[in-house]
Image (cartoon, rainbow, N blue to C red):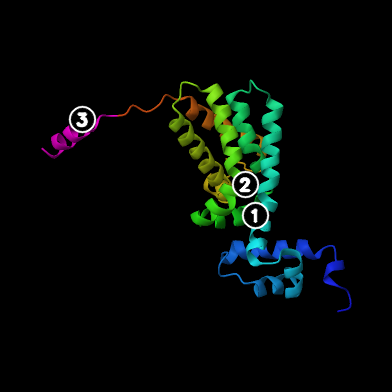
Amino acid sequence: MNESFAERPDTKSRILDAAEKLFALNGFKPTSLRDITAEAQVNLAAVNYHFQSKDSLIDAVIARRMEPVGRRRIEMLDAAGPDATLEQILTAFLAPVFEFKVESVVPLMGRIMSEPDLFMERVYRKHLQPLARRFQEQLAKVLPELPPAERLWRLYFTAGIMTHVLTWSGVLPEMSGGLCDIADRPALLERVVSFVAAGFRSGAPVQVPEEVMETSVVETKG
């Protein structure tokens, strides 16, 4: 091959595409650089040239998906202004993910979510932590009566719903007999925002004193 890998403009993208596919299918640890070079049809020197190491390649694969989402979320929050409504805040959190083509992001997301240590180290701390603080601050403005821990719980539940909708979207049409159309993304987003907004607005759960719980358990056994 006479053409240098450094001169081929599509080489880096091919490596990223191949790595994302194999990481999603087989996991991050089992997938070797040789597996990736075979899939991308490049030599090992090309991977070393563009990414230096497997760790750097993993970070690049994740960043390619996460950074556009983060930028879009900030843009939408900024556009909503200082007096954003709850629905605007939730839309800014959810819409950038729903804008993805499902088939391109779901396999990788599923793999990442199945490895909590990897998610915390490579996704949350590097891409989501500052953004999460921004959303928490915005939610505190519109829901000042809700305890901070409750706001965090509900944002956590919202992220879970978002992940579930994406990862299970392929089976919903069949499960619903065609009643649920996931192809209509604006309608899907509106439904999810309406659902989670109602959850955020619900009152904080009443904490039952421990002694009352113990008494209830004794009475039930009796």
Q: Report if the CB atoms under discs 2 and 1 are less than 8 Å apart.
A: yes
| Quarter of the view holding residue 95 | top right
Q: Earlier in the sequence, mark 3 or mark 2?
A: 2
Crowd rating for badge 1 (residues with CA inside 10 Å; few <14, some 14–19, many 20+): some
106 vs 176, nearest the viewer: 106
Residue beneath disc 3: 212
Kind of residue sitting beneath label 3: Val
Q: Position of residue 134 (x, y in %)?
A: 60, 33
Q: Start and end of the magenta stretch?
A: 208-222
Q: Earlier in the sequence, mark 3 or mark 1?
A: 1
Vertical relation: 102 (above or below) 71: below
Kind of residue sitting beneath label 2: His
The label on residue 62 is 1
Q: Earlier in the sequence, mark 2 or mark 1?
A: 1
Residue beneath disc 2: 127
Q: In the structure shown, which secondary structural element does the residue marked by tag 1 occupy?
A: helix
| Quarter of the view holding residue 71 | top right
Residue located at (84% from left, 68% from top): 6
Q: Report if the CB atoms under discs 3 and 2 are less than 8 Å apart.
A: no
Evaluate whether residue 184 shows in this view.
no
Crowd rating for badge 2 (residues with CA inside 10 Å; few <14, some 14–19, many 20+): some
